[in-house]
Image: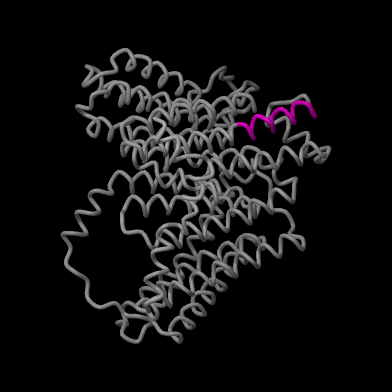
Amino acid sequence: MTAFPLAPAQLAPLVLAIAAAAMMMRPGRRPPAARLLPQAASLAALALALGGAALAGADEGGGPMRADAIGATMATLVAFIGWIVTRYAARYMDGEPREGRFHALMLATLAAVLVLAQAAHLALLAAAFAATGLLLRQLLLFYPERPAARRAAAKFALVWHAGDAALILAAAILWAAHGLGDMAALRALIGEAGPGAADHVAAALVVLAALLKTAAFPAHGWLTEVMEAPTPVSALLHAGVVNAGGVLLIRLADLVQASPAAMAALAFMGGLTALFGAVVMLAQSAVKTALAWSTVGQMGFMLLQCGLGLWPLALLHIIAHGLYKSHAFLTAGMAVAEVRAARKPGPVAAPGWGAVARAFALSLALYAAMAGLFMAIAGPKSPQALALGAMLVFGVAYLVAQGLADAAPRALTWRTALASAGAAAAYFGFQLGAQALWGAHLPAPPDPGPLEWALIVLAVGSFGLVALAQALFPLWAHHPAAAGLRVHVANGFYLNALLDKAIGGFRTVKAK
């Protein structure tokens, strides 16, 4: 087979970097190339990424960037989101005093993320993470006169670069222990010889870096404040850059999975972050703030998937979240207008205890039937995969409860029951697809031991209790205590303010 010295996707960052340099030469208002060059460069990067995906695995080579299936997938995702965001930014930023500088920073950030997605060497991966953080900080400070923007940028830089420090230290430990920085070589070495003490320490540092970069609890505050930057920046950060922590874990999946303690920490912190973000999101009144808290919850769920060893599903989650969240941020204004124009809804059917119990029983029964059908066709599923599916079905049970309420029309009852069955079928179908695409490049879920079983039971029980409380919320929403609780929940139980005080965020703003 013909050897490709440099895969097409590996040329995409170079195209974007050249375009960024050209835009930086005219950093002011409405530079001549503002409407054409950024979009053309991002479209070219997308075409190159698609070319790299078509040739993925043809000749992965041994350089610091590699065109394997995972790198090609992530490069395509980043390039596609970058193209969409760049097109949107051409109109959104038209006439801004530093319009050319904004486009240059956006293109340079996309280039850094594309390098990050395809990096095959720890040194290049750490450098790409650091460059992404430095560029994003400049984008967050695009309106430096806003105190909230300065505080968000300061918090982002502190948390992100703390993650950089953890990753660099992990790379240094692995180099000292094995004399290797190539991630594929490390994977093979750990698989043959087993993990040593240095590998366990490095895995813990990699998990710490991923937790910081995905805005996991309790370092989530910066992600909920980046809306002070222009909307294209928020879309790019929430849809693409925040997923980088997940990409780090997937790239080093064999190292992380070799450490039971690292996997347990991922599962626990991921589940806690997912539940925390989802609960706080429900109490938000502003669209973009709700989307930000949704990202916190979604990143937590992705970390939980990694902690359970469901690596292909975690990668699929990253792709789905990136596509959904970019669309959600860029159309948030339209959504508000549509809600205002819509007629007020009629009374909502509030399900009682009996309806909620029947809904959960029906959803779990449909899920069990679907699981049995798929296992009969495609073979057995791991306990981790079955547990994750149960958590997803708990969310659908909330909808089924609305359909089983006494005041609900029969058509709604059937529709919600079909939704539950459809969600279970989609889960197992997507799981099979993800396994076919990326399973050969990632480790299989480990056999659960006592600690893993305890975490599985804790996660399933916690998600079930939260879903139950959400379904029963209409029964006690008018209680005086509920109003006070809603205020505390909407403010994230003030953990972000405590973090501000601890890191000196308020003093940073005043000093400037």
Q: Which residues are magenta?
A: 165-178
Question: 436 or 487: nearer the eye?
Answer: 487
- Please give the name of the residue rendered at 23% of the width and 54% of the height, measured from the top-left corner: 336
Magenta stretch, overall SS: helix
Question: Is 66 situated left or right of 137 in this image?
Answer: right
Q: Residue 55 appears at what percent x and percent y?
A: 52, 29
Residue 342 in the image: x percent, y percent? 18, 63
Q: Quadrant of the C terminus?
A: top left
Magenta-colored stretch includes residue 41: no
Quadrant of the image occupied by residue 396: bottom left
Q: Observer-nearest residue: 41 or 459?
A: 459
Near-viewer residue (103 or 61): 103
Can residue 380 be seen in the rendering of this structure? no
Q: Image point 78% across, 26% down: which residue?
A: 176
Q: Nearer the viewer, residue 18 or 299?
A: 299
Q: Is residue 416 left or right of residue 55?
A: left
Q: Is residue 237 above or below residue 55?
A: below
Q: Which residue is painted at 45% across and 35% down in the image?
A: 508
What percent of the width, then of the height, locates residue 162? 58, 35
Q: Quadrant of the N terminus?
A: top right
Q: Find residue 87 and report its image quarter.
A: top left
Q: Is residue 167 magenta?
A: yes
